[in-house]
Amino acid sequence: MSDTLFPGKYADAAQTDLAHADPAPVDPALIDPTHSAHTRAYGAIHSNGPIGAMTIERRALLPDDVAIDVLYCGVCHSDIHMIRGEWGEQPFPMVPGHEFVGRVTAVGHAVTRFVPGDFAGVGCMVDSCGACDNCNAGLEQYCTAGATLTYASPDPRGAGPTLGGYSERIVVRERFVVKVPKDADLARTAPLLCSGVTTFSPMQHWRLGSGQRFAVIGLGGLGHMALKLAVHRGAEATVFTTSADKANDAYAMGAHDVVVWQPAASLPIPHAQDMANRFDFLLSTIPSPFDLAPFLPLIRRDGTFVNVGAPGTIGGVTGAGLWNQRRSLVASCIGGMPETQELVDYCCTNAIHPEIELIRPNQIDAAYLRVENKHVRYRFVIDLASARA
Ligand code: NAP
Ligand code: ZN
């Protein structure tokens, strides 16, 4: 794939069941008041509302805080679920955005890994208890007290819920900021912070290896990153897509096979018989409840079906379907901070980048519709640098 797939600079155009801890109060003496700032942001003032410009307040720096001018922020389908109220009631106004990169503008006096001028990235979390077993293992997304998500989450360090990366500036605790190499393609690095690490993490945990037969279901933002990562690991990759016109792109990204299917009981998966017991590793990015039954027979002995998509019901799961061939059905939530840094370094070193459509902030509503209609190729990224100019 190359940039030529998307000529012109601009496109035409979770959650998760994580519990939230009650925020612990911050000692006011630790706050450096010189760095609080009004910031332009893009969000909705009510559920399902349009995304518009607004002014928000970023907190003053604490000693271990990093202030970042956001340059590029990806649009994740989770942003749409959250804005639309598809994952339950949310706090508004909401400023989405949980995969972004920017330039460090100021650091608290206890910050050791960043200096102003560095490039930095932030993903889906901005805080966690830092003390539980999972935080100690670098798996902050599974913090037993509840990780603080980058937006719409109670903020232990600020007033009101967190406000995300569709904004020109943000302040984030250093532990939740990753380093971005100086020569990185910044716009194409931003989606790594969610779509990249969400697909990388299960491949690491369940050890997707060279020569294994891998399949991804859904070729969207997460799915196309999964495909690229699996191909880079040497797996033989198959794409299950409901969009026949994505087949050529899938092959260009390294797919070995493309199967066009429709999620309707009356339409069996084409060539399912030929694919029985075939895959070591299937990864679903389907964003809504789905039926596992058509896919179960395709998993080989000791194979794994990983759901990183829908948080809702997965139908068609039977005990026999799983114990036949000792199959596993598992799920995975984003990635921890060490793994996120590892993924950014790995992708930048090996030139594994998302395919993006760059948009301006006033195109976000239109972009949401194109994601919902499966038309995005393959991740929208908001250019906040140009909006600031
Ligand atoms: P996306 O860009 O919209 O991609 C999803 C793809 O799934 C679509 O492009 C489409 O691909 C396919 N699809 C859509 N509706 C479908 C349906 N009803 N039945 C079957 N296939 C369907 O979304 P994304 O940003 O990749 O996110 C995917 C899901 O993962 C979202 O629900 C998001 O909230 C969730 N997510 C989870 C985590 C986590 O930590 N687990 C992190 C981030 C996002 P084809 O056109 O190829 O069929
Ligand atoms: Zn996301």
Image (cartoon, rainbow, N blue to C red):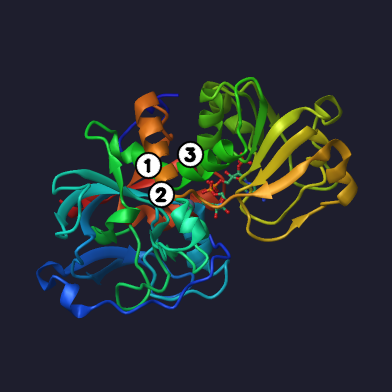
Ligand 1 lies under 8 Å from the Cβ of mark 2: no
State the residue position of label 1. 341
Any mark on residue 325, and which?
Answer: none
Q: Residue at x 50, y 49 (%)?
A: 370
Residue 96: image quadrant is bottom left
Q: Amino acid at mark 1?
A: Gln
| Distance CA(mark 1)–CA(mark 2) | 6 Å
Q: In the visual, does 180 lie left or right of 309?
A: left
Query: Which mark is in front, 1 or 3?
Result: 1
Labels 1 & 2 near each other (Cβ < 8 A): yes
State the residue position of label 3. 378
- Coordinates of residue 278 in the picture (x, y in percent): 78, 27
Q: Residue at x 45, y 64 (%)?
A: 147
State the residue position of label 2. 337
Q: Amino acid at mark 2?
A: Met
Q: Classify mark 3: residues with Cα within 10 Å, few (<14), some (14-19) or many (20+).
A: many
Q: Amino acid at mark 3?
A: Tyr
Whether residue 11 appears in this view of the structure is no
Whether residue 243 appears in this view of the structure is yes
Q: Classify mark 2: residues with Cα within 10 Å, few (<14), some (14-19) or many (20+).
A: many
Is 76 drawn above or below residue 37 in the view shown?
Answer: above
